[in-house]
Amino acid sequence: MAPASAAETQRWCAEADGFGIPVSLLVIPGPWRGASLARRPDYASFLRERRAGGDEIMVHGWSHRAGSEGGWRRVLGRAVARGAAEFAALDADEAAGKLRAATEVMSESGLSTTGFTPPGWLASPAARRALRAAGFSHTTDHFGLEDLRTGRRHRGFALSHRPGDGWSERFGAAVLETMARRNAACGGLIRLALHPDDLHRPGLRDATLRAIDAALRAGARATTYAELVESAVP
């Protein structure tokens, strides 16, 4: 979520409201496709309203763009996250610098948070240490949610779309819907990761809404990442 995707943010949030469920909003505080959060107080106000209504705000990197750092981790990040894996190959100082910039903007926007999801769900070991040092309480990767204070993991693969053309996009959408239904029936953690650009593909939007409906009908209880980690604290 960023000012550049304000219209899509509102549409996805409206869809969630239709189901009566909260969402975890992954906010890019730095410049992404245009103005940064600091330059759009109207968008920050919208996000504050969403949080007041029960949604979670999480930091989603700084600029959502990978740099030239680091060998094989950079290569992996480009392959998996199409150049968005900003934290995949950072050392501790680089990660700390980006986190300082991000938390400053979030704080000034009235959106302070201790939740962090790295772009592409990829963070180097040094970046994860920097998250703990910066006071973040939880983070996510492809395979689940981690409480950074206790090390406890909640396992659940992130289901998301890979927009393309033809059969591959339709096949992926069908898999997302099927897995959401099956995971709910088994009592597992279901994570549906939505991207603003998914809304420009009507078939992906429809598949997402069917997946949410199927999960809820199968007995799933909607929650945010923050609520999940806090509910597990003794």
Image (cartoon, rainbow, N blue to C red):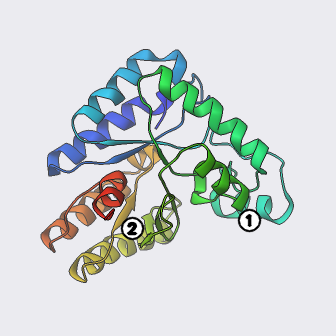
Q: Amino acid at mark 1?
A: Leu
Q: Secondary structure at mark 2?
A: helix
Query: Relative to 73, is 179 above or below?
Result: below
In percent of width and height, residue 20 lies at: 15, 49
Tell me where residue 145 sits by quadrant.
Answer: bottom left
Which badge, 1 or 2, is on the more N-terminal residue?
Answer: 1
Residues 173 and 71: in front is 71
At 36% from the left edge and 73% from the top edge, which residue is drawn?
174
One can see residue 106 in this view: yes
Query: Relative to 119, is 122 above or below?
Result: below
One can see residue 82 in this view: no
At 50% from the left edge and 71% from the top edge, which residue is drawn?
143
Q: CA distance from mark 1 to mark 2?
A: 24 Å
Tell me where residue 14 sits by quadrant.
Answer: top left
Q: Amino acid at mark 2?
A: Ala
- The answer to whether the residue labelled 1 contacts the one labelled 2, judged by CB atoms less than 8 Å apart, is no
Residues 55 and 169: in front is 55
Q: Residues within 10 Å of mark 2 (few under 14, many from 20)?
A: many
Q: Residue furthest front?
A: 234
Q: On the image, numbered disc 1 is attached to which residue?
A: 76
Residues 117 and 161: in front is 117
In percent of width and height, residue 102 lies at: 59, 33
Q: Residues within 10 Å of mark 1 (few under 14, many from 20)?
A: some
Q: Residue furthest right?
A: 71
In percent of width and height, residue 68 lies at: 84, 47
At 66% from the left edge and 49% from the top edge, which residue is drawn?
130
Judge left or right: residue 216 versus residue 207.
left
Judge left or right: residue 19 versus residue 66.
left
